[in-house]
C-alpha cells in the first residue's frame, strides 16, 4: 500500500473516474479523496505526504478530458449547501458550496423567485467549476451575477475572498486558469441576484423561443433555454461529451474581412474591444465534420462544436479527432482553434 492510505482522511486508491467525467472515458485516480468541507483541504495541506502530491480538483467532470490514468491526488468537491445570505435594495445574495450542481443551483434560485441565472440553465458541471471558465450561454455569463467567492490557497493555507475584479473574468477565462492555477481551490461562490429583474433576450434564438409570451418570467426563460439546449446539445447522461470542445476563436477585423471575401456566409460577432469572434461550430461544420466520426469518437450531428463519445472511446480517440478537426480548420480558414476542456 502506498503511504497516502495511512492518512486518517477517507482516501481511496486506484479509483475509476469513468462515472465522474461526462465524456465517460475510463481512467483511474492513483489517490482519490472526496472534499466535504474546507477542513478536508486544510487536512490535505497539513499531511506531509498528501501535501506534496500533484492535485487534480474534480467538480462535475464536465469540462475534462482524461487521456490516461491520473497519477495525482484527485480532490472531488462534494461539499453541499445553498443559502440566501443577505439582501440590500438592489440584490439578494445567495451562497452555494462548490460541490453543488450548477443546474441545481439555478433551479433552486428560481424556486425562491430569484431571477438572474436562468440563461445559464442546464449547463452541466458544479458550482465550484463555474467561475474557472466563467461559464456562459444564451447571452449571459456567470460573471454577470457573480458577487464573490472563497478559495483555499494551497500555497499559503489561507482562505481567500475574491471579488469579481480579483477573478479577472474573460471569455471562458479567469485568474484560476492563470495566476491561481494549481494553487487555489474554490470552496463556495456567492451571487448577487437582481431584485429588479429584467429578462436578458440578447440571444436571438432565445428571444424567438419566448416571442409568443408578453412578459416571460425567469422560470419561463429557464424552460426556453432548456428546450433549446435539449434540441441542440447531447445529454451527457446519454452520450458522453464535455459541451463545446473548442472555444470560439477571436480574430482581427482584417482577418474576418479577408475570410468574408471567400466565405460570405461566415458567422462572426464583433467584440467590445474591436476584435471579432468567429463561430467555431460553423467553421467545423463547413469542413464537413458535423455528424462524422473517427472510430468511437464523433462530432455531434446538431452542433459541430461538441465532440461525443459514441461508446467506448478513449481520451486518446477524442484527442485524435480534435487534432484532425484543428488541422482542417487551420488549412481551410487559417484559424487556430483552442481546446476548451482541460486535457489530462
Ligand atoms: N453553427 C453552424 N454549425 C454548427 C454549429 C453552429 O453553422 O454545427 C453556427 C450556428 O448556426 C450559429 C453559430 O454557428 O450561427 C453559433 O452557434 P450557436 O449559437 O450554437 O453557439 P456557439 O457559438 O456554437 C456558444 C457556446 C455554447 C453556448 C452557445 C449558446 C462557446 C465555445 N460555446 O456556442 O457553450 O451554449 O454559444 O450561447 O462559446 C459550452 O461552452 O460548452 C457551450 C455549449
Image (cartoon, helix red, strand yellow):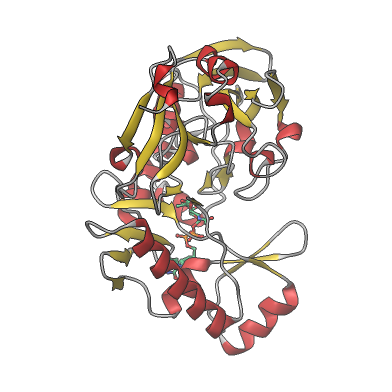
Question: Percent x, y for residue 217?
Answer: 45, 32
**Rendered-image quadrant of the N terminus:** top left
Quarter assignment of residue 144: top right
Rendered position, 230 above or below 99: below
Q: Nearer the viewer, residue 48 or 196?
A: 48
Q: Which of the pair 203/150 is nearer the observer?
A: 150
Q: Residue at x 63, y 83 (%)?
A: 259
Dividing the picture into quarters, in which one does residue 132 lie? top right
Q: Residue at x 48, y 40 (%)?
A: 120
Please say if 22 is above or below 130. below
Q: Is residue 78 visible?
A: no
Q: Residue furthest bottom?
A: 262
Q: Is residue 337 left or right of residue 147?
A: left
Can you tell which quarter of the image residue 273 is in? bottom right
Rendering coords of residue 176 (x, y %)? 64, 39
Q: Nearest the camera: 112 or 78?
A: 78
Amino acid at each position: 500500500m502506498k503511504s497516502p492510505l495511512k492518512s486518517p482522511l477517507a482516501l481511496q486508491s486506484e479509483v475509476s473516474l469513468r462515472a465522474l467525467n461526462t465524456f465517460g472515458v475510463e481512467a483511474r485516480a492513483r489517490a482519490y479523496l472526496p472534499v466535504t468541507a474546507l477542513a478536508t483541504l486544510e487536512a490535505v495541506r497539513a499531511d506531509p505526504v498528501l501535501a506534496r502530491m500533484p492535485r487534480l480538483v474534480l467538480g462535475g467532470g464536465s469540462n475534462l478530458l482524461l487521456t490516461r490514468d491520473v497519477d495525482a491526488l484527485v480532490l472531488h468537491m462534494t461539499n453541499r449547501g445553498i443559502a440566501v445570505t443577505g439582501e440590500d435594495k438592489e440584490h439578494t445574495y445567495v451562497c452555494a458550496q462548490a460541490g453543488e450542481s450548477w443546474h441545481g443551483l439555478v433551479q433552486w434560485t428560481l424556486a425562491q423567485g430569484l431571477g438572474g441565472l436562468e440563461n445559464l440553465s442546464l449547463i452541466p458541471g458544479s458550482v465550484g467549476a463555474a467561475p474557472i471558465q466563467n461559464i456562459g450561454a444564451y447571452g449571459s455569463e456567470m460573471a454577470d451575477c457573480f458577487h464573490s467567492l472563497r478559495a483555499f490557497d494551497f500555497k499559503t493555507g489561507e482562505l481567500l475572498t475574491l471579488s469579481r475584479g480579483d477573478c479577472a473574468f474573460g471569455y471562458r477565462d479567469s485568474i484560476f486558469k492563470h495566476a491561481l492555477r494549481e494553487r487555489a481551490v474554490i470552496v463556495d461562490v456567492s451571487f448577487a441576484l437582481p431584485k429588479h429583474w429584467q429578462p436578458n433576450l440578447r440571444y436571438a434564438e432565445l428571444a424567438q423561443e419566448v416571442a409568443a409570451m408578453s412578459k416571460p418570467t425567469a422560470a419561463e426563460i429557464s424552460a426556453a433555454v432548456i428546450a433549446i439546449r435539449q434540441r441542440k446539445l447531447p445529454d451527457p447522461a446519454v452520450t458522453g461529451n464535455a459541451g463545446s470542445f473548442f472555444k470560439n476563436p477571436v480574430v482581427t477585423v482584417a482577418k474576418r474581412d479577408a475570410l468574408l471575401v471567400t466565405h460570405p456566409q461566415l458567422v462572426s460577432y464583433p467584440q467590445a474591444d474591436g476584435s471579432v469572434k468567429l463561430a467555431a461550430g460553423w467553421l467545423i461544420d463547413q469542413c464537413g465534420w458535423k455528424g462524422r466520426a473517427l472510430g468511437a469518437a464523433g462530432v455531434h450531428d446538431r452542433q459541430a462544436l461538441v465532440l461525443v463519445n459514441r461508446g467506448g472511446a478513449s481520451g486518446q480517440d477524442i484527442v485524435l479527432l480534435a487534432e484532425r478537426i484543428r488541422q482542417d480548420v487551420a488549412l481551410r480558414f487559417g484559424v487556430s482553434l483552442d481546446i476548451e476542456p482541460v486535457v489530462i
